[in-house]
Every structure is written in C-alpha cells, then in structure tokens.
Image (spheres, helix red, strand yellow):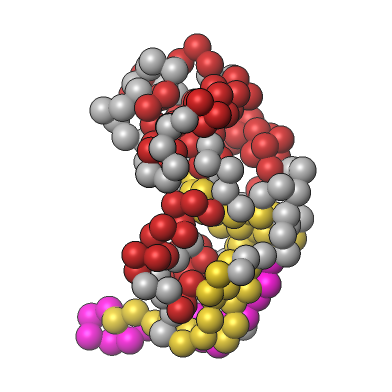
Amino acid sequence: MIRLEQVSRAFTEGGRSRVVLDGFSESVTAGERLAVVGRSGVGKSTLLNLIGGMDVPDAGRVRVGDAELTAMSERDRTLFRRHHIGFIFQFFNLIPTLTVGENLLMPLEMTSGVHRAGRERALELLRRVGLADRREAFPDALSGGEQQRIAIARALVHAPDVLLADEPTGTLDGETAEEVLALLDELTGQGKVTVVLVTHSLEVAGRMDRILRLGREGA
C-alpha cells in the first residue's frame, strides 16, 4: 500500500541545511497499522507529510497504492489526498465556526459532494463515536476527548485507503486517551484501512501491528 524508496529530505534553517531523512526506505502493507516513534526532529512528521503528499522529497520515490506521488503535480497530489488519505491531528483542527455535523461532512464537500450515502455514513460514524446527539453543537462546546472522536470520524467519513495520525492522544489525559485509542482500534482494526501513527508513547505504539523506530539509522 505504501512504499518509500531511497527518500531524502532536508530543510534550511538559519542558513544551514538540516538533513531529516537520508536514503530512507520503508514499506507498509495494505491494512497494516504502523506506529512511528523516535525523538523530536528525526523526521516523524516529515514522513507523514511525504506519505500524504503535502511535501515531496528531495530525492527518491513515494508510492501510495498504484499512485506515485513524486511524479504528480501539486494539484494532482491534492486531489489524490482528498480522495484517498484521512488525517487525525494532535490539536483536532476542527473548524470552530462549523457545527459537529458540518465539520464531519467537510471531506465529502471537497470530493464527491454530500450525497445521501455520505450523509448516512457520517451519521453512522457519529453513532459509533458516541456523539450522535452533538451533531448541532460547535467544537468549543465539546471536551478534548469529544473533539478528537469527531476528528477521527471526520478522517474516516470519505472511506480513505490510508489514515495518517500525528500524536492523536498527545493533548489528552490518560483515561481519555485510552478511550480514543479503543475507538481507533474499533474503527480501523479490521484491516480495511492502512494506518500510520506518529507517537512519542511506546504504550500507544504497542497497540499498533508494528513499530518503526526513526533515529540515526533512518534520519
């Protein structure tokens, strides 16, 4: 499902080049749930951005399914991302001026449009995350855990092939984090979605199928 081949990426900071990934290769099979761990600055978020097509490498190739992202234009990568990639962020990234229901339907608005099947899927996901009664609420009326549950539902509403999660429990307390992880297990644990999850927590990483440790050998 995901293949990175000899990928290199560097950034310029303070007039100096800092290499984040250097000849990095990795594969993730369809339906696998991969945790990416490592100290700050080793390239965890860069890896997510490359897989999601939000960034391109300086060298090497990135493939997701049958698509080679490194051969696409920026516009084509954007369209591919809208249809095939779901994102969960540490700080939720819900739009405060939209209701829960409107936030949930946004990925459909940007792809095939909001049709009956899409609305039914959104309502079903709201039920599965336990927030069907909060559809008309605004994000600031929800707790952090509730906002992250909505963010998970939003990431899955367009039935993506790949789900990318960047520290999805990083701002949550232990009990709420456990609830969110259990929900993520439930919604992705049947092999239908390929998951790449970045985390600093080895406990969180241990819930995935495999752990990839980034460090000097991969950065």
Q: Is residue 37 left or right of residue 56?
A: right
Which residue is located at x 71 percent, y 47 percent? 192
Residue 43 part of the magenta-drawn span: no
Answer whether residue 15 is magenta in the image. yes
* Residue 15 x %, y %: 22, 85
User: What stretch of residues is rendered in magenta?
Assistant: 13-28
| Quadrant assignment, res 58 | bottom left
Locate residue 121: give its quadrant. top right
| Residue at the left extreme, as displayed | 15
77 or 98: nearer the eye?
A: 77
**Rendered-image quadrant of the N terminus:** bottom right
Q: Residue at x 39, y 60 (%)?
A: 78
Q: 204 or 72: which is nearer to us?
A: 72
Q: Position of residue 25 (x, y in %)?
A: 62, 81
Q: Is the magenta region chiefly helix, strand or loop?
A: strand
Residue 27: x percent and y percent? Answer: 68, 72
Seen at 60% across and 20% down, the residue is 127
Horizontal and vertical percent position of residue 116: 50, 26
Q: Is residue 168 above or below residue 6?
A: above
Q: Is residue 81 left or right of residue 198?
A: left
Residue 155 appears in view: yes
Report the front residue among 3 and 23: 3
Tell me if residue 216 can be seen.
no
Instruction: Name the residue rendered at 53%, 37% in the picture.
Output: 157
The number of callouts visible is: 0
Most extreme residue toward the top is 133
15 vs 150: above or below: below
On screen, residue 48 above or below 33: below
